[in-house]
Image (tube, helix red, strand yellow):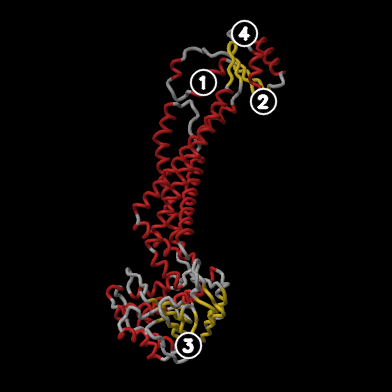
C-alpha cells in the first residue's frame, strides 16, 4: 500500500538531510507506528506521503501510484484516498461536529444524499452520535480528536495517517483514540501513526518503524518504542 | 465530480460581507476607473459622430456676391469642375440655403429673428484630396464673383488633435486606475484567503480539487469587478441624462450625442472590463497567496 525506495529528503538550505535513504514497504491493512524523537523526520515522512513535499531522491508509491512524478491535478485524488489526523485536530470552530465531517465530503463534491447517510454512521462509529450538533469548543480534547478521526475516515480512505494523534491527550483519552484507530484498522484500512507516546506503542505491539536523525534504524514486527529518553 | 455553483456563490458572498470595508474600497476603484473609461468613451463617441457629419460635408464653401448673373455662376462652376483636385461642385441657391437653415433650427426661436432671405448663393466643393484645399482656395481668391471662401479643414484637424489627446489622456488615466483597482482587488482577495486559511488547509487535506478551492475566491473578485462596473454604468447613465442631454437641449443645432447602440455597446464593454479586472485581481492573489 505504501512503498518507499531509497527516499532522501534535503530541505532547501539545510545541511543534513531530513530523511536519508529510507526503504519501507507497508502492506494493505497493516497498523504501523512511526517512532522517534522530535526532529527525527516523522513529519517529513508523513508530508512526503501526502505529497506536500517531493523527495530529493527516491521513489514513493501509494496504492500503486507513483506519487513523485504525479501530476499536480491528480494530487487531490491521492489525498482523497488518505485520511489525516493531527495533534491539533484541525477542526473548524464555526462548524458543529457533523458539519465538520460533512465539510470533508462537500468539498470533494459528494452528493447530499451520501453526506446525509455517511455522517451519522461515522459519528456512531466514533461514539459521538449525541454530540453531532456540538461545536468543537464544547467538546473535550478526546472528543475533538474523535471527530477529526471521523472526518478522516468518512470517505473510506485506504490509508489513515495520524501525526501525534494523542499528543495533546491524557492517557485515558489516548487509549480510547488508539482503540478507535485499531477498530478502523480492522475494517481493512491501513494505518500509520507517528508518535512518541512510549506506553501506547509498547502496549499495542504493532509493527514499529524507528527513525533517528533521518535514518531508519529499526523495522520491527510486534515492536516496542525502544528509545531511552 | 459535481460542481455546485450555489456553493461557490454562497461562499463568495459570505466572504464579501466579512471584509466589507476593504471590498468597498476595491469596488469603488473599479467603479471609478470604469467611469473614467466610460466618460472618455462617451466623449469620443460624440466627437466621432460630429466628425463623421463634418466629413460628409463639403470641404470648401464659396459664397458668391449678390447679383452675380447666372451665366457667370455657371461658368465659374464648370471651370472649378475642370480642376483635377475637385470631385464635385454643388450650386446652392438662396432659397435652398434658407430651407437648410430652417431644417437645422426647426425647434428653436432663432428663425423668428430672420427677416426675408439674407443668405447668399454659394458653391460647395468636395475635393478628391482634402489636403489640397489650400491650393484650391488660393486659386479662387480675388475673383470678383466671390464674396467669401470658407474651408473647414483646420477645424477638422484641431478636432482630430483634440480627440487624439483626449483619448490618450483617458486611456492612460483609466489604465492607472485599472491598475490600482487590480491591486486593491488582489489585496481584498488576499485577506479573504487569509480569513479562510483553515478551511483551505482542510480542503487541501481531504482532497478538494484545486479549482474547487480557487473558485470562491475567483468569484469574489469577479463579483467585485461586476459591482464596480454596474456602479460606473449607473453613474454614466446619470451623467448622460443630466448633462449631455441638457447640453443637447440648449445647442440643438450641434450634432451632439451618440446612438443608443453605442451606449449599449459601452455598457457591454464596461461589464466585460469589470469582470476581467476582478478575475485578474483575484488570479494575482491566488497565484501569490493560495498554495493548492
Badge 2: how crowded within 10 Å, few (<14), some, or many (20+)?
A: few
* Residue A183 visible in the displayed image: no
Circle 1 residue: B101
Quadrant of the image occupied by residue A141: bottom left
SS assignment at label 3: loop
Depth-wise, is mark 2 or mark 1 nearer the camera? 2
SS assignment at label 1: helix
The chain ID associated with circle 4 is B
- Residue A55 location (% of width, % of height): 53, 73
- Residue A7 location (% of width, % of height): 54, 77
Sequence-earlier tag: 2 or 1: 1
Depth-wise, is mark 2 or mark 4 nearer the camera? 2
Circle 4 residue: B68
Q: Are marks 2 and 1 in contact (CB under 8 Å)?
A: no
The chain ID associated with circle 2 is B
Depth-wise, is mark 1 or mark 3 nearer the camera? 3
Q: Are labels 3 and 4 assigned to the same chain?
A: no
SS assignment at label 2: loop
Badge 3: how crowded within 10 Å, few (<14), some, or many (20+)?
A: some
Q: In front here: A7 or A59?
A: A7
The chain ID associated with circle 3 is A
Q: Are marks 1 and 3 in contact (CB under 8 Å)?
A: no
Q: In front here: B92 or A127?
A: A127
SS assignment at label 4: loop
Quarter of the image that includes the C terminus of chain A: bottom left
Q: CA distance from mark 3 to mark 4?
A: 116 Å
Q: Are labels 2 and 4 assigned to the same chain?
A: yes
Relative to residue A72, is residue A176 drawn left or right?
Answer: left
Circle 3 residue: A30
- Residue A58 location (% of width, % of height): 57, 76
Q: CA distance from mark 2 to mark 3?
A: 91 Å
Amino acid at each position: 500500500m505504501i512503498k518507499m525506495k531509497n527516499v532522501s529528503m534535503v530541505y532547501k538550505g539545510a545541511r543534513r538531510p531530513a530523511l536519508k535513504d529510507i526503504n519501507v514497504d507497508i502492506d494493505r491493512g497493516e497498523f504501523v507506528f512511526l517512532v522517534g524523537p522530535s526532529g527525527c523526520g516523522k513529519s517529513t515522512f508523513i508530508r512526503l506521503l501526502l505529497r506536500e513535499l517531493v523527495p530529493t531522491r527516491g521513489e514513493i508509491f501509494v496504492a500503486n501510484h507513483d506519487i513523485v512524478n504525479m501530476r499536480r491535478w491528480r494530487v487531490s485524488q491521492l489525498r482523497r484516498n488518505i485520511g489525516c489526523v493531527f495533534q491539533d485536530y484541525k477542526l473548524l470552530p464555526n462548524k458543529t461536529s457533523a458539519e465538520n465531517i460533512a465539510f470533508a465530503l462537500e468539498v470533494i463534491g459528494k452528493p447530499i444524499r451520501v453526506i446525509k447517510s455517511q455522517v451519522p454512521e461515522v459519528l456512531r462509529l466514533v461514539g459521538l452520535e449525541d454530540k453531532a450538533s456540538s461545536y468543537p469548543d464544547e467538546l473535550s480534547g478526546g472528543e475533538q480528536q474523535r471527530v477529526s478521526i471521523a472526518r478522516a475516515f468518512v470517505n473510506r480512505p485506504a490509508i489513515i495517517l495520524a501525526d501525534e494523534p494523542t499528543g495533546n491527550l491524557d492517557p485515558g483519552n489516548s487509549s480510547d483514540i488508539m482503540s478507535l484507530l485499531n477498530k478502523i484498522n480492522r475494517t481493512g484500512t491501513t494505518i500509520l501513526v507517528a508518535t512518541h507516546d512510549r506506553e501506547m506503542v509498547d502496549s499495542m505491539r504493532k509493527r514499529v518503524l524507528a527513525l533517528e536523525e533521518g535514518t531508519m534504524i529499526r523495522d520491527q514486527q510486534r515492536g516496542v518504542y525502544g528509545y531511552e529518553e | 465530480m459535481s460542481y455546485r455553483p450555489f456553493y461557490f456563490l454562497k461562499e463568495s458572498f459570505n466572504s464579501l460581507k466579512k471584509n466589507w470595508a476593504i471590498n468597498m474600497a476595491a469596488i469603488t476603484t473599479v467603479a471609478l476607473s470604469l467611469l473614467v473609461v466610460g466618460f472618455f468613451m462617451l466623449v469620443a463617441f460624440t466627437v466621432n459622430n460630429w466628425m463623421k457629419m463634418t466629413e460628409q460635408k463639403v470641404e470648401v464653401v464659396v459664397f458668391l456676391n449678390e447679383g452675380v448673373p447666372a451665366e457667370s455662376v455657371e461658368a465659374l462652376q464648370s471651370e472649378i469642375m475642370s480642376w483635377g483636385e475637385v470631385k464635385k461642385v454643388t450650386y446652392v441657391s438662396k432659397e435652398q440655403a434658407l430651407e437648410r437653415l430652417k431644417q437645422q433650427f426647426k425647434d428653436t426661436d432663432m428663425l423668428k429673428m430672420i427677416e426675408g432671405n439674407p443668405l447668399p448663393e454659394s458653391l460647395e466643393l468636395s475635393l478628391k484630396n482634402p489636403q489640397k484645399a489650400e491650393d484650391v482656395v488660393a486659386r479662387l481668391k480675388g475673383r470678383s464673383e466671390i464674396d467669401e471662401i470658407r474651408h473647414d479643414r483646420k477645424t477638422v484637424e484641431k478636432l482630430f488633435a483634440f480627440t487624439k489627446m483626449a483619448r490618450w489622456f483617458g486611456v492612460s488615466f483609466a489604465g492607472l486606475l485599472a491598475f490600482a483597482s487590480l491591486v486593491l482587488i488582489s489585496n481584498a482577495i488576499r485577506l479573504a484567503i487569509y480569513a479562510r486559511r483553515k478551511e483551505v488547509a482542510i480542503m487541501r487535506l481531504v482532497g478538494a480539487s484545486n479549482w474547487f478551492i480557487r473558485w470562491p475566491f475567483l468569484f469574489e473578485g469577479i463579483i467585485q469587478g461586476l459591482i464596480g462596473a454596474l456602479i460606473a454604468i449607473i453613474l454614466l447613465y446619470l451623467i448622460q441624462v443630466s448633462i449631455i442631454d441638457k447640453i443637447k437641449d440648449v445647442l440643438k443645432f450641434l450634432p451632439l450625442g451618440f446612438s443608443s447602440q453605442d451606449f449599449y455597446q459601452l455598457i457591454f464593454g464596461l461589464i466585460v472590463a469589470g469582470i476581467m479586472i476582478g478575475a485578474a485581481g483575484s488570479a494575482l492573489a491566488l497565484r501569490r497567496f493560495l498554495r493548492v
